[in-house]
Every structure is written in structure tokens, then in C-alpha cells.
Amino acid sequence: MTREIILRMIKMAELRDPLETGAHVNRVGAYSIEIYHRWAAKKGTVGTEIKKIKDILRIASMLHDVGKVAISDTILKKKARLNDKEYDEMKLHTVHGARLFQDSKSDWDDMAAEIALNHHEKWDGSGYPGHIGDINRQDISIGPGKEREEIPLVARIVALADVYDALISSRAYKNSWPEEDVLNYIDAERNKHFDPEIVDAFLDIHDVIKAISEKYSS
């Protein structure tokens, strides 16, 4: 029943932003658990712990952008590039998403909140929303960003999975990138946007990632 309720939340978000969710969140969820599995195996994590985290991560990662339900349609569905004011408003979807999982009752709540809040942080500290403190404040200001291990592991994984899928996918405002260009970009962004160990894990299993992309192609 809990899983069905969560999947309905995802469908609710899709109603607001139909071009960015649906197959996209399925792919991001599937990429994320495979990247985690490879990273954890290389660290020597025991199988029972890997399975436990993967079970939670699959669904939690699918809700990474659920906070977009609080963003105005004039911004969310704008065909052209956002101006600075609009982009600042869009950045707050991370905070709105994290607010949905307050008063945690489970490990899943905790992980979903971590991912929603932190999946746009960058390894080098240039991401957002940064050190917010009280996410219920009305006068939240963005930045400076968290960096390196300040960013939860699961959010570092989803950050890469999300960017990869965005680049290989067509959007209203962009064409899809060739696979080779995407891989070169991700490799170039190690130690900048992405945790280098997460990049290594992703590249190690690129054949699996590619198969997932094709499975959830629409």
C-alpha cells in the first residue's frame, strides 16, 4: 500500500510537469540503484546492506523532483530559458520537496528528504540550495553550496543519474546529446559537479545504464 501511494505521488508530479517525469523518474531510479550497487561493492559493503539501501533508494530517488509541484506553471512550463529571478524560484523545488518528508517515520522518509534537498548540490560546492538550516523559513536564500562529503551519498548518486538522463533526453528547450558526448562530459565533471568515485562506478557499469535507458525509453 505504501509503495502504491508513493507511485501515485509520482503520477501527481507528472501531471504538473509531463515532459520531465514519467519515464525519466523510472530511469533515474533504476540508474541510481545500479550505481550505488557498484560503488558499494567496490567498498566491500556486505550484500544485506546493499539490498537494504537499494530497496529504499529506488523509490526515494524517483521523487527527487517532487517539489516542483510547488513551482508556478509560468516557470515550470516555460519553453524558453529561465531568467535569473525565475531560476532562483525554480531552485526552491529542492526545499519544497524536502518539506514533504518532514516528521520522519522511516529510513525512507529520511532518504527521500536528503535526495530532494541535495540532488542539485555539486562536489566542488557550486551547487544549490546550500546550507539552509530551517527549511520551513519563508525567507530562504540560496547558497553557498555544500561540497564533497557534506552532500549525502545518495544525493551525489542521484545528481549524476539525473544529469545523465537529462542530457541523453530531448526536452522542449534542447535536443538530446550523443551518448559519447554525454560520457565525455560526465568524465570531465569529476571533482567538479560529481563525486569522482560515483563517476567511476557509473562508467564501470555503462552497459547496464544504457540497457536501462533503452528499457524505459518512453
Image (tube, rainbow, N blue to C red):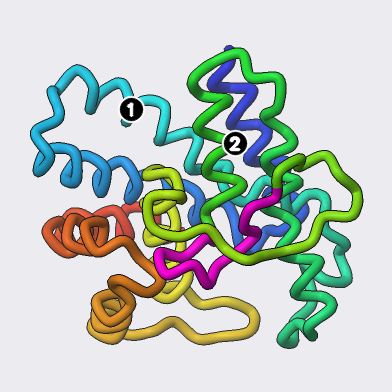
Q: Main secondary structure of the magenta part?
A: loop
User: Label 1: which residue?
Assistant: 53
Q: Quadrant of residue 58?
A: top left
Helix, strand or loop under label 1: helix
**Relative vertical location of residue 216 with respect to residue 175 in this rendering, above or below:** above
Count of labels in the image = 2
Q: Residue at x 31, y 41 (%)?
A: 33
Magenta region includes residue 175: no
Residue type beneath disc 2: Ala
Magenta region includes residue 131: yes
**Residue 152 position within the rendered picture, expressed as x and y whole percent measured from the top left:** 44, 44
Q: Residue at x 78, y 49 (%)?
A: 69
**Residue 207 position within the rendered picture, expressed as x and y whole percent measured from the top left:** 15, 60
Helix, strand or loop under label 2: helix
Asked whether the viewer can see residue 27, the reply is no
Asked whether the viewer can see residue 108, the reply is yes
**Residue 216 position within the rendered picture, expressed as x and y whole percent measured from the top left:** 39, 53
Mark 2 or mark 1: whose residue is earlier in sequence: 1
Which region shows up in magenta?
121-132
**Relative vertical location of residue 199 with respect to residue 41 in this rendering, above or below:** below
Contact, CB < 8 Å: mark 2 with mark 1?
A: no
**Residue 190 position within the rendered picture, expressed as x and y whole percent measured from the top left:** 28, 72
User: Label 2: which residue?
Assistant: 113
Q: Nearer the viewer, residue 17 or 122?
A: 122
Question: Crowding near pointer 2: few (<14 within 10 Å), some, many (20+)?
Answer: many
Q: Residue at x 50, y 32 (%)?
A: 111
Residue type beneath disc 1: Ile
Q: Residue at x 64, y 79 (%)?
A: 172
Q: In the rendering, which numbered label is found on residue 84?
A: none
Compared across the picture, whether 115 is left or right of 29 comes to: right
Q: Quadrant of residue 21?
A: bottom right
